[in-house]
Image (tube, grey):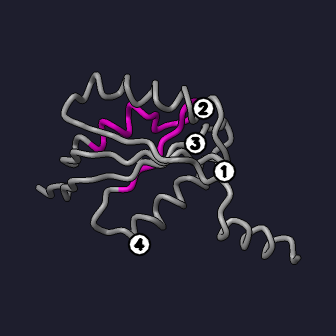
């Protein structure tokens, strides 16, 4: 029987979620790339709605891996209702089922020099 690797800390990327599978795959791909860059962390994608895994399901997966602390990264460009209200509420609710987990929520992507570089690269400007 194969046992799952355990981790102390996880990075949870949270987006809105979509009915379109190809839209949800973007976050899955980002999580996979971050997992390869950060092998000491458990990296998981989650969607607020319309797709799985949900935030609750992602917290459960983290708990199964022995995670104690989750760093929640809102995969949004800027702050708004989802970042300021919805994601914190979903995390609080998930912790009710997993009281041994702690979490902290970071700022969303926002304005950053590297995002400016991506925009310039993709627009050719």
Disc 2 on helix, strand or loop? helix
Asked where in the image residue 123 lies, by quadrant, the reply is bottom right
Q: CA distance from mark 3 to mark 1?
A: 14 Å
Tag in front: 2 or 4 = 2
Q: CA distance from mark 2 to mark 4?
A: 27 Å
Task: Name the residue rendered at 41%, 72% in the picture.
Answer: 37
> For mark 1, what is the residue?
22
Q: Residue at x 27, y 66 (%)?
A: 40
* Residue annotated with mark 3: 15
Provide the secondary structure element on which disc 3 rests. Answer: strand
Looking at the rendering, the stretch of residues picked out in magenta corresponds to: 43-62
Q: Which residue is mark 4?
A: 37
Q: Is residue 32 in the magenta section?
A: no
Pick whichever of labels 3 and 4 is earlier in the sequence. Answer: 3
Instruction: Name the side, left or right, on which 61 lies relative to 80.
Output: left
**114 with respect to 92 (left or right):** right
User: Which corner quadrant of the image does residue 51 belong to?
Assistant: top right
The first of marks 2 and 1 along the sequence is 1
């Amino acid at each position: 029987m194969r046992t799952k690797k355990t981790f102390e800390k996880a990075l949870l990327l949270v987006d809105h979620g979509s009915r379109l599978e190809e839209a949800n795959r973007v976050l899955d791909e980002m999580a996979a790339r971050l997992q390869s860059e950060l092998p000491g962390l458990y990296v998981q994608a989650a969607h607020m709605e319309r797709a799985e895994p949900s935030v609750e399901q992602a917290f459960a997966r983290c708990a199964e891996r022995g995670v104690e602390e989750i760093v929640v990264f809102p995969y949004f460009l800027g702050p708004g209702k989802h970042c300021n209200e919805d994601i914190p509420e979903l995390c609080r609710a998930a912790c009710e089922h997993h009281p041994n987990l702690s979490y902290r929520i970071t700022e969303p992507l926002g304005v950053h020099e590297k995002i400016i570089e991506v925009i310039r690269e993709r627009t050719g400007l």
